[in-house]
Image: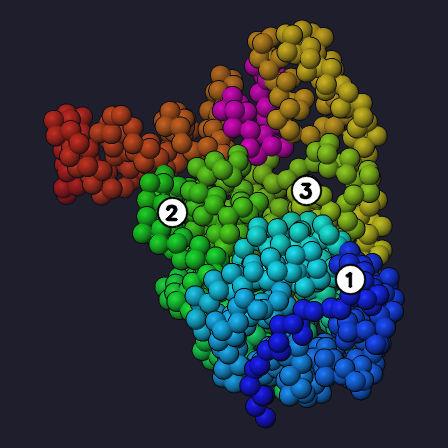
Amino acid sequence: MMPAPLRLAPLAAMLLVPACAGAQRLDDARALQRSGKYQEAITAYAEVPAASAGWAAAQRGLVRTLATVGRYDEAEATARRATASAAGRELWNVLGEVLQARGKTDEAEQAFTRALAEHASDSLTASLHLAELHYERGDRDRAFTEFDRFIDVYNDHADALDAEQMADVATACRYLGERNPELFKDALRAFDRAIQRGGATPAGDEARVALGELFLLKYNGADARSSFSEVLQANPSNPRALLGAARQRDFDGERGADSLVQAALRVNPGYPEAHVFRAELAIDLEDYAGAEREVDRALAVNPSLSAALGVKAAIRSLAGDTQGFAAARARALQVNPHDAELYNTLAELTARVRQYREAAEFARQAVQLDPRSWRAYGLLGMNQLRLGEIAAGRQTLETSFRGDPYNVWIKNTLDLLDTYKNYDTTRSGHFVFMIGKSESPLLEPYLAELGERAYARFAARYAYTPPAPIRIEVYRSHADFSVRTVGLAGLGALGVSFGTTLAFDSPAARDAGPFNWGSTVWHELAHTFTLGATDHRIPRWLSEGLSVYEEHHARPGWGFEATPAFLSAYRAGKLVPVSRMNDGFMHPAYPEQVMYSYYQASLVCELIARDWGEGALLKMLQGYRAGLGTDQVFQRVLGTDLAGFDKRFDAYLRQRFATPLAGLDEFVARMAGARVLFEQRQYDAAAPLFARALALFPDYGGDNGPYWYLAKIAEARGDTARAAEMLTRLVSLNETNYQAYVDLSVLRERLGDVKGAAEALDGAMYVNPYDVAMHQRLALLYQKAGDPQKVVRERRAVVALAPVDRADALYELAVAYRDAGDGAAARTTLLRALEQAPNFEKAQALLLTLHREEKP
């Protein structure tokens, strides 16, 4: 049945409130509602006399306030009674709103249609709700025809529209933007006008929240935050604004999303959308049982809520419940047979737990169901990029962007893809490397060598062979790396693994801060194998813990290590138990908790390897691949439940760090006093304090720790062996102290340990590979140590760094190739040297020698 044509009630009927006691009570009720004093507002609305001209408006406010606090039965009963009154025609729309919120969509449609037929003052809002119902049911053509009428309403009656009606126009334009993106701009303008007209009223706040939701829809977290904050300043208890603010924080990777949504649920314990969001947060934690509890609470209030039905299907899919997934999907499609958002939800939530191939397939189904779902194209394209399907991903994203050019994530990603022409793509062994043209000659030899070493270790260790090739992308700009990872700049991580596609910061990405790019590559490659070995079902915390564990076993010093701050957090009870380890990664309670969680998770792996053997770690991965949950894996492989393991792990930490925990305060005090004396060059007085600090915390390798200062004191005293010993200990605990690596190399060479000197300087290259003099020195050290392949690598690095005498650098590289037995490469390199300096006699002589040696 088509709704009656839209017809606005006379302006006076909408806005005029007679001067009487009822009018004042109505104003009081609205003020109480806007300030979040909902119970007082309910009382005030109920006290507006039935004879008052404002009674219908008061009943409307009463019903909406009851619904706001989750008293849906009372709200529906109140609305039904009101529709039976003399002024009942004014209450059909609000009855429909309550029915719609409870999933009673057929009754809601009847109520909205009745409001239109009665020409109620809020019939425009009823018309919007009708269109939304048709949209949610999948009757999109009909819905868009109804939304389109709002353009005429605006054009013909813009000056007569109140705040709520202007917000209705804005909402209609938001929907119409799916087919005509320019109308998103009209939606923004209409929301702004609604806010201006609503001012400090509930209607004004509703427009502000809707505007914030639109900003979030377009990946604009900053403006969304402003919109929600403006509402929450006036009413810290507005559930919809609290939920919006929670979603904004989650979107921007900020802490506090869980506390904000909890605040919304304190106001309205049955708030369906808030429970859906809590379910999504639980999925991030891979807590599928908890997620299902939340989504079932949402469906108990609104059994037809499409967002809840989509999340329900995602939970069943992620839990490996094939029958449950089929049933949940069928239930969602029964509500809307053309629901592309069902598959979009499946794609988004599946990708959030690293199942990118499945996510791409769900997005592909969304596109097939609705070829105009630009979000589906975006999700498909992003997951194609994660799978290394760069050309296909770009094409899909371009389709998404043509349909919706205001999606910041897609725009940023396409801009990034435009820069790929500035990268070299090379194949080496098991890998494809994408590295900036200016850095590729320098970094590729290191990456190829390191990658193959890691590949061999992990393939044997995890009994898994990834599909070839593994793609490694290296970004000189941290902002570009962030866009590649999450579509927006500002990501705190240094590397990411999508499985067989890895991306990480180049060591030149100074905006990323100092870091060890070698250990980062090793860490991310470990993910490739642990994800693949479990069919991407390994919990996030264990995958991260194993990656750090593997860093520790790759090279001394690589990976997170213990710090005074970590032990202080443990002592203060600020580390999460193993049974909730994902919380530390996904919902950190303080800024440092993510970093602490990496190290803590690696300690869990160390404990398991110590007490059950490293084979237990592989058996755990096999359990996850078989679809077992963490409780089941711990019981089956380790013979303990999570509660028991929590206690065992706590005992392990207390035992392992007994000495520094007992002397932590003294350590801090000793170090502070010793540093003062060191700065005053009172080395004899400082040394005993540093030594005492070292005895209290021998596992601390910070840049400002005792090893560094004791090494400097030993050097000042001429004790080269002692200085080398201290720096050796330091770099075995610290992966980023470039100067310590360089100084240690010098000291070892002074002691006659050429091989050790080369090893130390090699470690420095994974922090800063851009000093040509260091590569020249390392080439000489490897030459003395008898490692011709490493000499070649270092001479290639010298050439890549464009030295002043390029011809000589090429000559030295040619010599290295010759010494390594690669005559062909030596001759080619000599020809390059002679292109630079045609009269270069040494190059001419060596080339002649090589030609002679080549002849039989």
Q: In this view, does 772 lie above or below 321?
A: above
Q: Residue at x 37, y 24 (%)?
A: 773
> Image check: 293 left or right of 49?
left
Give the residue type that dot 3 points to: Pro
Residue at the extreme left:
839
Q: Earlier in the sequence, mark 3 or mark 1?
A: 1
Whether tag 3 and tag 2 are in contact, CB under 8 A, the answer is no
> Image check: 700 left or right of 217?
right
Q: Give the range drawn in magenta.
A: 720-744
Question: Crowding near pointer 3: few (<14 within 10 Å), some, many (20+)?
Answer: few
For the residue labelled by badge 2, is the local secondary structure a helix, a strand or a loop?
strand
For the residue labelled by badge 1, is the local secondary structure a helix, a strand or a loop?
helix
Give how far across and how far down residue 612 sits, in percent.
75, 53
Q: Which residue is drawn at 65% across and 72% down?
A: 12
Q: How far apart are marks 3 and 1 (CA)?
A: 44 Å
Look at mark 2 in the image and give the residue it sits on: 435
Q: Please give the label number shown on residue 591.
A: 3
Q: Please give the label number shown on residue 27.
A: 1
Q: Which residue is drawn at 15% across and 38% down?
A: 851
Give how far across and how far down residue 551 sits, in percent.
59, 44
Q: How far apart are marks 3 and 2 (CA)?
A: 31 Å
